Image (spheres, rainbow, N blue to C red):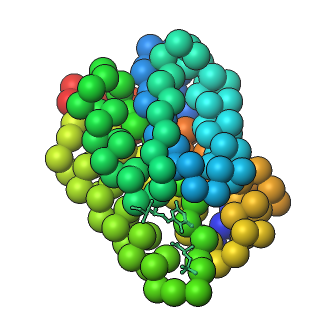
Amino acid sequence: MATNLKNLSDYNKSNVPSAANMKFGIVVSEWNEEITEALYQGAYNTLVLNGANPNNIIKKYVPGSFELTKGSKYMAECTDVDAVICLGCVIQGETPHFDFVCNGVTQGITQLNLDYNVPFIFGLLTTLDQQQALDRAGGKHGNKGDEAAVTAIKMVQMGRSLNR
Ligand SMILES: Nc1c(NC[C@H](O)[C@H](O)[C@H](O)CO)[nH]c(=O)[nH]c1=O
Ligand SMILES: CC(=O)[C@@H](O)COP(=O)(O)O
C-alpha cells in the first residue's frame, strides 16, 4: 500500500507490546540532517510512548546513509541492544548515485538481518525530492521514524516469543 494511502504514524497501540524491558540502538545518518533528526525524534518519542526507558536508547551518528550498514553492525557488536533502528534520507540528485546508495544500504541492512540475531529496522527514506522527504518525516504522510520504532518493538517481542 502506498504511503499516501497509509499514514506512517498510524498504528494500533493495543497491538504494540510494552518496550519497558527492551534496549534500542538508533543509528542516524547526518546527510539531510533536518529530515533525519525529525525521523530520530519520531522514533525516540514512539519508543518512550510505548514504555521504553530513555536510558535504554543509544543514539549514534554516521556521515551518510551508505554508512548505516557499518554503523549498525558496530552498534550490534559493541552493545547489548535488542534492536537497531537505521535512519537515513536519500534524495535523488542529477546522477545515478541515488540508486547505488539506496541499493547498497538496502542490501547491507538486509544482510545484517541475516547475519545477526537482533533485528535491524530499515528506516530509510528514498525520495525524489526534499518535499517528499519532509512529508514522511513528520509531515502529511506521518513520520517514518514512528513506523520504525513500532516495527522494532514488535520484532523484539516476536524474537522473544520464539526464545531466539
Ligand atoms: N546523497 C546522499 C548521500 N550521499 C552520501 C553517501 O551516503 C555516503 O556517505 C558517501 O557516498 C560516502 O560513502 N547520503 C545520504 O544519506 N543521503 C543523500 O541524499
Ligand atoms: C543520493 C546522492 O548521492 C545524490 O543526492 C547526489 O546528488 P548528485 O546525483 O546530483 O551528485
How many labels, in total? 0
Q: Quadrant of residue 77?
A: top left
**Residue at image location 57% in from the left, 56% down from the top:** 31
Q: Nearer the viewer, residue 86 or 34?
A: 34
Q: Quadrant of residue 164?
A: top left
Q: Nearer the viewer, residue 160 or 133?
A: 133
**Residue at image location 68% in from the left, 30% down from the top:** 45
What is the x, y in percent for residue 109?
A: 33, 55
What is the x, y in percent for residue 115?
A: 17, 47
**Residue at image location 38% in from the left, 33% down from the top:** 83
Q: Quadrant of residue 92?
A: bottom right
Is 53 situated above or below 76? Answer: above
Is residue 13 visible in this depiction of the protein?
no
**Residue at image location 43% in from the left, 70% down from the top:** 102
Is 53 situated above or below 75? Answer: above
Q: Say which quadrant the N terminus sits in.
A: bottom right
Is residue 111 visible in this depiction of the protein?
yes
Is 75 situated above or below 137? Answer: above
What is the x, y in percent for residue 4?
A: 72, 70
What is the x, y in percent for residue 137?
A: 71, 53
Q: Nearer the viewer, residue 80 or 29?
A: 29
Task: Point out the quarter of the image occupied by ligand 2.
Answer: bottom right
